[in-house]
Image: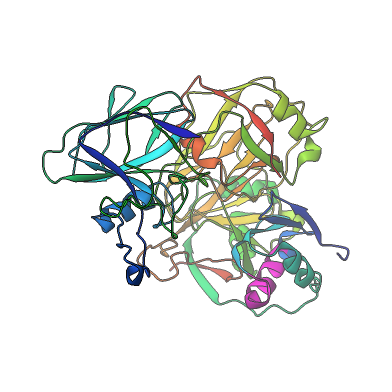
Amino acid sequence: MRDGLRPRPVGPRALLVEVDSAEHAAALAGWARARRDRLGEVGEIVPAARTVLFDEVAEPHRLRTVLAGWSPSAAVPAGPLVELPTSYDGPDLADVARLWDVDEAEVVARHTGVELVAAFCGFAPGFAYLTGLPAEWAVPRLDSPRARVPAGSVGLAGTYCGVYPTASPGGWRLLGRTEAPLWDLARDEPALLAPGTRVRFTEAP
Amino acid sequence: MSLQVLSAGVLTTIQDRGRAGHAHLGVPRSGALDPPAAALANRLVGNDPGAAVLEVTLGGLSVRTDTGCWVAVTGAPTPVSVGGRPAAYARAEWVPAGATLTLGTPATGVRSYVAVAGGLAVDPVLGSRSTDTLAGIGPARVEPGQLLPVGRGGPPTPLDTPPRRVADGLRLHPGPRGDWVEGDALDLLCAGSWSVLPASDRVGLRLTGPPLPRRPGELESEGMVLGAVQLPPDGRPVVFLADHPTTGGYPVVAVVDSADLWQCAQLRPGEAVSFRRGR
């Protein structure tokens, strides 16, 4: 396969494809979903930080052949845009301001000023890893995770932003909270932030 | 393999679906008197519905197997025992080699059916293995002392019968991160003797044994498959089961064959586990 697309077999019925970034993983997963009828039977397409897992693959050779046609510049349909009104009163807002060497108002301005994209989900159902923050804003995880982070908490870890869909332990640095329902099993699509969804945070009134 | 008949009750015969198409020659159709019961017994052990079974009249059958085999008893509900211990009616039961299957007296009904995986392999006559008690065609009635040949059963179909645990190890396939192990990950896993840790649960089967020498460092989270063998920094493998997280950051150095994975659900803490290479 071409550069930037490195497949690794995962047993006989799955393929893990390495790419160069989370953005590429999301793009490849979206591209593959859009032509699912050409891949042969594929049970799962799971993007992650630098990989896309194709699981329960009926025809691995056919899948590899189709995937060879992907390139990072291939067009992917833009996902839906979701706005998340957020109260910026999180316990780590001051720490993030210090790490960024700005005041808290500037943290909010920066965080509401970029459009993020849900690259992949993991950690918990509906927990989306949002990409789009510049590398120089990366922040380390907490040294010791909190035992309980409330649902709706908006946090940063590395260059990712995430919103806890349900209450859980967690080590991300919390900027605030949103009331948006991120995970609802009663909906057809239970995750509000499925991979490919574009996200904009706004300051809640 | 074969069944040795120890006792046959008042009347035991071999039956299948009978001899169709020979009535113009004076040949009765014969066949199991309760065809749905015979078909169910066959289905339970994964046989073709037309495989030959034993039709046991008012119980009293006792047979010993020379090879472990699956059996199922249907029709007239009768107490069933295997190796002297009670066994289930209308369910696939494993009879270990050398064990005796015994049917008591049914409380209701007359004819019980015993299917053996592979079917009874007596020679067919006019396309059927049924004993015809009227015309005397087909195998003789079953008598004590007889050896009844049994065909090669495929494995029972998973839908109908519980698969049997294999003792020679869970089959492994290469995982995506075998290069995180110093040496050949599959060789090391297959050579080690492992035992199940009490922390095992629906997420994963946690094993202890000779730790695999692992490259230090961490991966970014990546998608996980069912049966993934993850290697945390301590070098003790975890086999991912049904409730496994969708992504994880420890390298997956092997994958357990999906056909063997169910056995992980039945392994108890402290029990030994071994691996072998799958194909």
Comparing A92 with B82, the one in front is: B82
Image quarter where the C terminus of chain B lies is top right
User: Total number of numbered labels?
Assistant: 0
Q: Position of residue A175 (x, y in %)?
A: 54, 53
Q: Position of residue A66 (x, y in %)?
A: 76, 72
Comparing A126 with A162, the one in front is: A126
B91 w.r.t. B183: above or below: below
What residue is at 78 percent from the left and 37 percent from the top?
A: B180
Q: Position of residue A24 (x, y in %)?
A: 75, 65
- Decide if residue B265 is on the left or right side of residue B225: left
- In the rendered image, residue A38 lying in the magenta stretch gets the answer yes
Part of the protein shown in magenta: A25-40
- In the rendered image, residue B36 lying in the magenta stretch gets the answer no
A159 w.r.t. B67: above or below: below
What residue is at 71 percent from the left and 69 percent from the top?
A: A27
What residue is at 61 percent from the left and 31 percent from the top?
A: B169
Q: Position of residue B69 (x, y in %)?
A: 45, 35
- Decide if residue B195 is on the left or right side of residue B68: right
Q: Quadrant of residue B228?
A: top right
Whether residue B231 can be seen here:
no
Comparing A174 with A98, the one in front is: A174
Q: Quadrant of residue B275?
A: top right
- Decide if residue B101 is on the left or right side of residue A123: left
